């Protein structure tokens, strides 16, 4: 199975995503420069974390215009699995693949530490290997991770079960104490209505080996390998 890892100018978690998919999961992985207009037969698209275009204007606001994004849109519209991690999540929101926005963190500080998220939904390609209520210890590294949306949008996301990951405390209780950045409803990750596009603020690709302090992120990437194998893509 092949992962396409999109590289924007300023991406800095592209190599983490490559390492996790290629070396930890043992899958094929290829970098795809943002100016390219093909995805090289990829089965999964990863928009990695970083500071695309230096986070100028707004995070993800310039990257959404990169030529490759048209191809990513077609891929997603055809049902292909797409995950945006951190800055990738920001790009997906700016590009309108997902609803809402990521504001400056409550407290206005860049946060770099481990947090816990609870898996809320398992019928997405990036969570199908987990169980509902499973708690994952994952690192965050962001200045703009404060998920926000209009009240009716948040209500619709909840009603449609599009909140896939929620910040929680280590025991799995969802409270403000486990919310690092002020996100509404403790939202750490959402999916689109079709459920094939997922955005997540913490970094599962940086939590795939015990040497990094957690292997809990593996289930996110392994899920899509299992999901695609079931379709015959592997
Ligand atoms: N790790 C990242 O992807 C950084 C995210 C983003 N540019 C921010 O600081 O909000």
Image: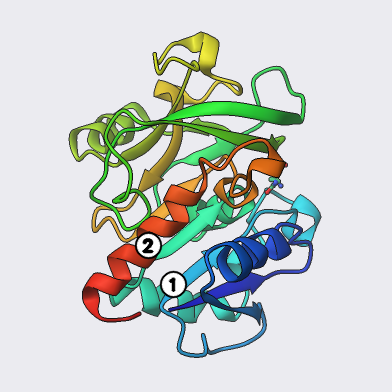
Determine the CA span between mark 2 and mark 1.
8 Å
Mark linked to residue 19: none
Taking depth in this image into account, of 127 and 7 the one nearest to the observer is 127
Mark 1 C-beta closer than 8 Å to ligand 1 = no
Taking depth in this image into account, of 55 and 82 the one nearest to the observer is 82
The crowd level at tag 1 (other Cα within 10 Å; few <14, some 14-19, many 20+) is many
Q: Disc 2 on helix, strand or loop? A: helix
Q: Quadrant of the C terminus?
A: bottom left
Q: Is residue 202 above or below residue 123?
A: above
Mark linked to residue 224: 2
Taking depth in this image into account, of 19 and 46 the one nearest to the observer is 19
Ligand 1 is found in which quarter of the picture?
A: top right
Chain-order first, disc 2 or disc 1: 1
Report whether residue 133 is seen.
yes
Q: Position of residue 34 (x, y in %)?
A: 66, 77
Report whether residue 79 is seen.
no
Q: Is 170 left, or right, of 87 in this rendering?
A: left
Specify the quadrant of the image occupied by residue 33.
bottom right
Q: Disc 1 on helix, strand or loop? A: strand
Taking depth in this image into account, of 46 and 224 the one nearest to the observer is 224
The residue lying at 46 percent from left, 29 percent from top is: 117
Q: Quadrant of the N terminus?
A: bottom left
The residue lying at 36 percent from left, 31 percent from top is: 134
Q: Are discs 2 and 1 less than 8 Å apart at CB?
A: yes
How many numbered marks does the figure carry?
Answer: 2
Q: Is residue 147 above or below residue 68?
A: above
Q: Position of residue 98 (x, y in %)?
A: 40, 52
The residue lying at 67 percent from left, 83 percent from top is: 35
The residue lying at 44 percent from left, 11 percent from top is: 175
Q: Which of pointers 2 and 1 indicates the residue nearer the eye? A: 2
Q: In the rendered image, which residue does mark 1 sit on?
A: 44
């Amino acid at each position: 199975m092949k992962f396409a890892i999109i590289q924007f100018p300023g991406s800095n978690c592209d190599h983490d995503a490559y390492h996790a998919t290629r070396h930890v999961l043992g899958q094929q992985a290829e970098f795809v420069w943002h100016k390219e207009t093909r995805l090289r037969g990829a089965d999964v698209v990863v928009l990695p974390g970083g500071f695309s275009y230096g986070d100028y204007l707004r995070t993800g606001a310039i990257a959404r215009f990169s030529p490759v994004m048209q191809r990513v849109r077609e891929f997603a519209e055809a049902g292909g699995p797409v995950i945006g991690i951190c800055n990738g999540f920001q790009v997906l929101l700016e590009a309108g693949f997902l609803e809402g926005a990521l504001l400056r963190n409550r407290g206005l500080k860049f946060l770099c530490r481990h947090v816990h998220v609870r898996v809320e939904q398992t019928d997405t390609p990036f969570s199908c290997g987990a169980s509902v209520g499973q708690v994952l210890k994952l690192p965050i590294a962001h200045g703009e991770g404060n998920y926000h949306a209009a009240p009716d949008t948040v209500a619709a996301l909840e009603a449609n079960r599009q909140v896939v990951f929620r910040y929680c405390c280590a025991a799995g209780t969802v409270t403000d104490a486990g919310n690092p950045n002020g996100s509404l409803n403790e939202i750490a990750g959402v999916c689109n209505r079709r459920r094939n596009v997922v955005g997540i603020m913490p970094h599962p690709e940086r939590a795939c080996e015990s040497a990094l302090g957690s292997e809990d992120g593996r289930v996110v990437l392994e899920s899509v390998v299992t999901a695609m194998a079931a379709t015959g893509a592997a």
